[in-house]
């Protein structure tokens, strides 16, 4: 039997894309209308943003862990969190979680190495671009990275929170992100990470002057392969004893 996938959501749009990707790509592997069991839990985005803007990452971790406990209670075997920003506190959450977690940036780094990329441009919220999530994961994989300049990071953050998380996908914003990707290419990047889970809803591979690493869909595919036992990499956090034969 496939493992039960738990999705800890932060924004609705990003989580929905992850959920839809798992369902859409399951059929080719499992058969018509088939996919692993999936459950989503999310606290409202407002709760997360109050904590993030106050630099209260302990509160962010508490929200994530509460979702994990609720998903575990209804049978989830492991967690995928389609939100790059809140992976900043992935480690303490994963240590306390009743079930293991995948790590979105490590999934991206693994795919970048598989494709032979060396220097990745990272697009995301200002918290992602300025924070340790991709810096550490890519360094661990022996990969270099670059982020847009400060003014561009602020503009992208505004696009994400004023438009993308609200389901608004504007042509002008698409053009701006394409311009930023051009700049990253000029700076020596050989691929770009769409490191905000909503950016893939605005930028497709055909739009980008660099090959794209879509963090949302890569995480969804990693979760699907793990659920059906076809992955090589396992979630980094081990579940505690006492869950019998349950997986994730």
Image: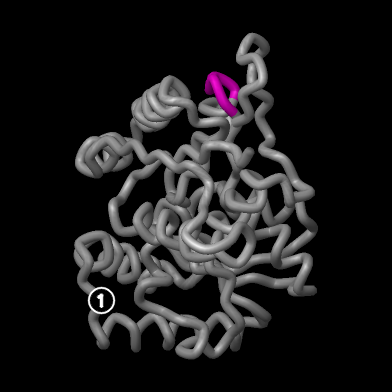
Quarter of the rendering occupied by the C terminus: top right
* Residue 199 is one of the magenta-drawn residues: no
Q: Is residue 96 left or right of residue 61?
A: right
Which residue is pictured at 37% across the width and 64% down the height? 198
Q: Quadrant of residue 145?
A: bottom right
Give the residue number, with chain letter if any, for mark 1. 169
Question: Would you say the magenta stretch is mainly helix, strand or loop?
Answer: loop
Place residue 169 in its image quadrant. Answer: bottom left
Task: Identify the magenta region.
Answer: 95-99
Q: Residue at x 35, y 76 (%)?
A: 202
* Number of other residues with Cα within 10 Å of mark 1, as a class: few under 14, some 14 to 19, many 20 or more: some
Residue 26 sits above or below residue 88 on the image: below
Residue at horizontal 74 percent and vertical 51 percent from the top: 230
Q: Position of residue 113 (x, y in %)?
A: 77, 65
Q: Is residue 98 magenta?
A: yes
* Residue 112 image point, x, y percent: 71, 67
Residue 34 or residue 133, whichever sits in front: 34
Q: Is residue 109 above or below residue 169?
A: above
The quadrant of the picture occupied by the N terminus is: top right
Residue in the picture at 20% in, 41% down: 46
Whether 34 is drawn above or below 121: the answer is above
Residue most extreme to the front: 32
Residue 47 position by quadrant: top left
| Label 1 element class | loop
Residue 182 visible, this angle: no
């Amino acid at each position: 039997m496939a493992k039960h996938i738990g999705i800890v959501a932060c924004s609705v749009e990003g989580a929905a894309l992850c959920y839809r990707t798992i369902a859409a790509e399951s059929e080719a592997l499992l058969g018509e209308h088939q996919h692993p069991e999936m459950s989503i839990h999310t606290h409202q985005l407002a709760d997360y943003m109050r904590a993030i803007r106050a630099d209260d990452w302990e509160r962010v971790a508490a929200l994530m862990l509460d979702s994990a406990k609720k998903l575990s209670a209804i049978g989830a075997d492991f967690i995928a969190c389609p939100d790059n920003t809140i992976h900043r506190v992935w480690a303490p959450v994963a240590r306390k979680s009743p079930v293991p977690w995948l790590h979105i940036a490590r999934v991206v780094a693994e795919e970048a190495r598989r494709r032979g990329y060396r220097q990745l441009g990272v697009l995301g919220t200002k918290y992602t671009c300025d924070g340790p999530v991709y810096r550490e994961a890519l360094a661990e994989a022996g990969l270099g990275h670059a982020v847009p300049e400060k003014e561009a990071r602020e503009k992208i953050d505004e696009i994400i929170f004023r438009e993308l998380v609200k389901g608004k996908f504007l042509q002008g914003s698409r053009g701006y992100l394409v311009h930023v990707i051009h700049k990253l290419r000029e700076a020596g990047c050989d691929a770009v990470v769409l490191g905000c889970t909503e950016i893939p809803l605005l930028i497709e591979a055909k739009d980008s002057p660099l090959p794209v690493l879509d963090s949302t869909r890569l995480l969804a595919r990693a979760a699907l392969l793990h659920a059906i036992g076809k992955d090589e990499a396992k979630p980094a956090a081990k579940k505690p004893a006492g869950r019998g034969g349950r997986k994730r």
